[in-house]
Amino acid sequence: MSTPKMHDDEISTDAGLVRRLLAAQFPDWTGLPIRPFDSAGSDNAIFRLGDDMVVRLPRRAGRTVDSLDKEVEWLPRLAPQLPLQIPLPLARGVPGEGYPCGWAVYQWLEGETAAAELISDPRQAASDLAGFLAALQRIEPDGGPLPGEHNFFRGVPLVTRDETVRSAIAALEGKLDAGAVTAAWEAALEAPDWQGPPVWIHGDFADGNLLVDRGRLSGVIDWGGLALGDPACDLMAAWSFLPADARETFRETLNVDDATWARGRGWALSVALIALPYYWTTNPVRVAYSWARIREVLADHG
């Protein structure tokens, strides 16, 4: 059975393909059970391999493959300097068996997708999130990639998203309060651009990319948005995951200035708005995340 498709140009994948790829390239793992993993992620089809590994196959050629190459290169360098677990690549596969893209085997990280009801102490979670971002931003940027197609242009000046955001608002006519959303977006655009040097960003630091284990944040996954850019991009978690009463703890611990906070609110809003019309019928989890994020941004802005 193939994994459900989210994109018109998506490549079909299934457990049989994974087994054939493993048999041809990593035969030592062919005896392990393989099962599809239901994920809201849109870039890679995910398959569990045994108990402690995961196979990731890009759903589309092009930038998704570039993102995977980038993760394989950089995640092992970043991991020792970060306070939460991140997935580590174990093997890099090449095209084969009719599948046209490179692919990878990663370490499996224990934990559940972060949700408010799984967190024992929201303020502790806010502090943990801030500590993780601070550590990421302190890592030397030498040789790191600047934003581009490989990371979906996360971390660029916010104004470059203006046309796409307004198109998304128009596409959602009748489904949301266009006036309120437009006002919140325009307020974010008024904030000055980032004037400091680019820093490491995760690029999608929110929703299904945070893991919780025994009530505490334990890991950060899905690093396809990794690049050097405006740190405001990674503030999305403040409106995507944290309850309102823990948001200020996050901001204070990270010591975020007013302009960066305003841009962060804009990033949270823009990513949610752009996702809604695209995934409206194909990814209900992503749609639910987006609605929740928009509600939080509007409540905070108002």
Image (cartoon, rainbow, N blue to C red):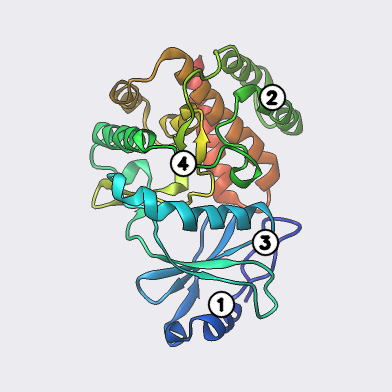
Q: Amino acid at mark 2?
A: Asp
Dot 3, how many residues are within 10 Å of its Cα: few (below 14), some (14-19), or many (20+)?
some
Looking at the rendered image, the quarter that the N terminus falls into is: bottom right
Q: Which mark is residue 202?
A: 4
**Mark 2: secondary structure:** helix
Please report contact status of discs 3 and 4: CB closer than 8 Å, yes or no: no
Compute the Cα span from label 2 to label 4: 21 Å
Q: Earlier in the sequence, mark 2 or mark 4?
A: 2
Compute the Cα span from label 3 to label 2: 28 Å
In the depicted structure, whether residue 251 falls above or below residue 153: above
**Mark 4: secondary structure:** loop
Please report contact status of discs 2 and 4: CB closer than 8 Å, yes or no: no
Mark nearer the viewer, 3 or 1: 1
Position of 255 with respect to 154 (left or right) is left
Instruction: Identify residue for label 1.
Output: 18
Coordinates of residue 277 in the picture (x, y in percent): 70, 40
Q: Amino acid at mark 1?
A: Val
Instruction: Identify residue for label 3.
Output: 5
Coordinates of residue 264 in the picture (x, y in percent): 49, 25
Position of 85 with respect to 28 (left or right) is left
Dot 2, how many residues are within 10 Å of its Cα: few (below 14), some (14-19), or many (20+)?
some
Instruction: Identify residue for label 2.
Output: 162
Coordinates of residue 129 in the picture (x, y in percent): 33, 36
Q: Earlier in the sequence, mark 3 or mark 1?
A: 3
Rendered image quadrant of residue 174: top right
Q: Earlier in the sequence, mark 3 or mark 4?
A: 3
Compute the Cα span from label 1 to label 4: 28 Å
Compute the Cα span from label 3 to label 4: 25 Å
Q: Amino acid at mark 4?
A: His
Q: Earlier in the sequence, mark 1 or mark 4?
A: 1
**Mark 3: secondary structure:** loop
